[in-house]
Image (cartoon, grey):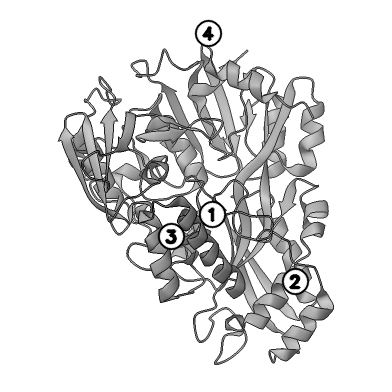
Amino acid sequence: MKKLLLATAIAACASGTAVQAETLRWARAGDALTLDPHAQNEGPTSAMMHQIMEPLVMRDMTGAVVPALATSWAPSEDNPNVWVFNLREGVKYHDGADFDSADVVFSLNRAMTKDSDYKELLASVKEVRAAGPLTVEIETDGPNPIMPNNLTNMFIMDQGWAEANNAVKVQDFEGGEETFAARNANGTGPYSLVSREPDVKTVLTINEDYWGKDEFPMQVKDVVFTPIQNQATRVAALLSGEVDFIQDVPVQDLQRVDASADLKVITAPQNRVIFFGMNQGDEDLAADDVEGKNPLADKRVRQAMNMAINREAIKKVVMRDQSIPAGVAMPPFVNGWTEALDAVPAFDNEKAKAMMAEAGYENGFSIRLDCPNDRYINDEAICQAAVGMLAQIGVKVQLDAKPKAQHFPLISNLETDFYMLGWGVPTYDSEYIFNFLAHTKGEKYGSWNGTRFSNPDIDVKIEALASETDLEKRNGMIAEIWQVVQDELLYIPIHHQVLNWGMANKVDTIVAPDDAAKFKYFKLN
């Protein structure tokens, strides 16, 4: 395939404007779920918000942490439990309002409330305070060595705008709430919102007063985003020139797109793993045909299902070699990942059948699998393949695939017993995974833990990671937690996702590991 050389692309992204800015027509399978910056911690939602709003610190297109609304940050010299952030001067919101420390205090406090999908990232925070108009202090329960990493998708709102528009409270997305902030936005980012039709079209235009206009190429003037769920339609739009850039070229169309003289495909591993979650905690399941007990509570059943999934077959047939089979629900980018943890379990139907029989399910059972059909690469096709594989050991699966906007609340609201989920790790650290996926579900932690797994000892260890500054000791704690997660088989890992971005030849960029295309870095030839 025609792949951009990394060094060349980085240099291109860093250089100044060489051509007149113009429109970029962008498409992907699914839309942002909301424009409320704290309501949904979800990849396409964050990717959209990065155009309009900004965090204190962010990751650039290579994945490196770089300044955004903060120009510098460091632990306080007086108190090791405090991080001090120095804010950028002269920044204005799209409506002309000034940005200052009060907005940061307001936004971080907002992100710590019940309906926020980001509260786990701030679980160790005791207080956020303004130490001056352009200085913010974040005090935590003990020294937090990775606090800046936790802020890369923590977008800052204008407090005055939020108060004027009844947007102080975070949207209850799972509860189906509609709010002003869900459809409108006022940020400091490189692009401002022109119009928003959810699941139809979103239009952005360049922020001529952007603080970074001389630091970034800023060659994209207008962005027209169109979600196109149907794979064939999405590819046809790229081939015909109707769109310039799609983030999810279907694997079966990679060669076709790349063969076009006017197009190219660039590819890279993503900081994301795809897996199945299982309700192992409830005494009985709503989505199975076993009365009075929960087959997924028996570890032997979970082990049997794990070894019945032929990951290599999914890679070859479903993903056309565009995936990396996984043995752990953690991408290789993440601190804590090891080859040993990621060893893929052997596919062994005979052993799996024996374990099912040993657990008392020689005749199997039936269960519903909830799956998204517009979020991950070939998500529904992966689930369909798993249905056939599990049938070989007597697990009769009824597949229910639906758009992510309907799928994700099933997990958050504990309304699914068996489900697909993908997980990216913006902090590049295992603590992020544990906080959301392994900790007991509660007010501050575990919002995406649909497994109902709960272990008080593990909870204590997870919470202790936030204040452990001895990195060698901390890594040992991470390894201990992963051992329990793996031994208990909370999740059935499928694969590490590979990104395939398709674009017109005029578009010049690299693939971001987090799949967040930040258009201020893009160049147009």
Name the side, left or right, on which 150 lies relative to 128: right
Residue 46 lies, with reference to residue 442, above or below; the image says: above
Q: Residues within 10 Å of mark 3 (few under 14, many from 20)?
A: many
> On the image, numbered disc 3 is attached to which residue?
435
Which amino acid type is shown beneath numbered disc 3? Asn
Q: Which residue is mark 4?
A: 20
Q: Helix or strand or loop: what does disc 2 sit on?
A: helix
Mark 2 residue type: Met
Provide the secondary structure element on which disc 3 rests: helix
Mark with earlier residue (2, 4)? 4
Q: Quadrant of residue 210?
A: top left
Labelled pair 1, 2 in contact (Cβ < 8 Å): no
At a point 22% along the width and 41% down the height, the residue shown is 105
Q: Which of the two discs, 3 and 1, labels the residue nearer the N terminus?
A: 1
Q: In 3D space, how far apart are the residues under numbered discs 3 and 1 (Cα atoms)?
A: 22 Å
In percent of width and height, residue 92 lies at: 27, 23
Work out which residue is located at the far left of the displayed protein and give it: 132
Spatial CA distance of label 3 from label 2 is 27 Å
Q: Which residue is mark 2?
A: 307
Check disc 4 and give the amino acid type.
Gln
